[in-house]
Image (tube, helix red, strand yellow):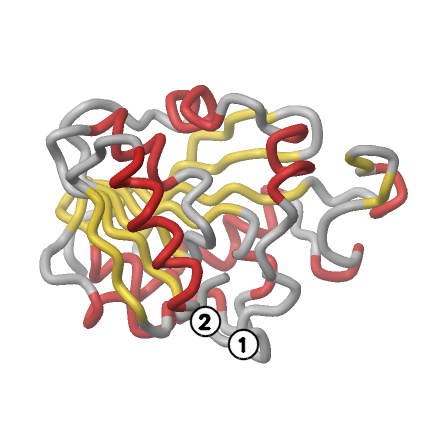
Amino acid sequence: MGAPVDRFQNTRQPDRDWWCELWPDPAAVLRKLGLEAGDSLADVGCGDGYFTIPAAELVAPATVYAIDADGTMLDEIDAGAIERGVENVVTVSGDARELASLLPERVDVVLIANTFHGVEAPTAFAEQVFRSLRPGGRFAVVNWHDRPAEETTVLGEPRGPPSALRMTPDETRSVVAPAGFEAADEVDLPPYHYGLVFRRSHDR
């Protein structure tokens, strides 16, 4: 998912079966993060669109940009959107570290789910997000809690990134805030995740 794996570590697309077991209702997760009708969205490291297509249904008629470096995943999103009659998804192939130049317009929300832990230069990436958002826009980060992998099991197996890559909410705040974001709202996303929703401050 997202930029090449040497830059976004441990971010390969998970198997759909345990993804569904973890979050059987992706739209409910998005609503908890504050996404609503009319919000344009960039789903960064979108993978096969597990959140992308539900997001598009939720925010329609606003546009959802699906950003990923893996063209095969983007093809799956295009096919899934056609199958579900979703017409407001735009797939974008490219390096997420250049997000601001990939998007044709600024958006209301940037979402990065299960990928931020692998970003090599998180503050620099957050600066790209800042430049991609409209004034007052939001940056939603979904992260695994900082727990040992053996404690975050799905379908009987340890899941998620190595313990050394996991970030507490405060650690996430500490690398995002310097990019120009105001204090984040924290959302519990059981069983093993949290969400932080940062708001873009005024232009610096």
Say which residue label 1 marks: 7
Within 10 Å of disc 2 (Cα), the crowding (few <14, some 14-19, many 20+) is: many
Q: Position of residue 6 (x, y in %)?
A: 59, 79
Task: Name the amino acid type tagged 1.
Answer: Arg
Using the rendered view, name the quadrant where residue 189 is placed: top right
Kindly identify which numbered label has been placed on residue 123: none
Q: Judge by depth and name the residue closer to the eye, 117 or 28.
A: 28
Using the rendered view, name the quadrant where residue 190 is placed: top right
At 60% from the left and 41% from the top, the residue drawn is 16
At 46% from the left and 40% from the top, the residue drawn is 50
Q: Position of residue 102 (x, y in %)?
A: 21, 68
Q: Judge by depth and name the residue closer to the eye, 85 or 29.
A: 85
Task: Name the amino acid type tagged 2.
Answer: Ala
Where disc 2 sits, the SS reads loop
Say which residue label 2 marks: 3
Q: Tell whether label 2 touches label 1 (CB within 8 Å).
A: yes
At 62% from the left and 69% from the top, the residue drawn is 9
On screen, residue 177 versus residue 138, left or right, reads right
Within 10 Å of disc 1 (Cα), the crowding (few <14, some 14-19, many 20+) is: some
Extreme-bottom residue of the structure = 6
At 55% from the left and 51% from the top, the residue drawn is 172
Q: Position of residue 35 (x, y in %)?
A: 30, 28
On screen, residue 82 versus residue 20, left or right, reads left
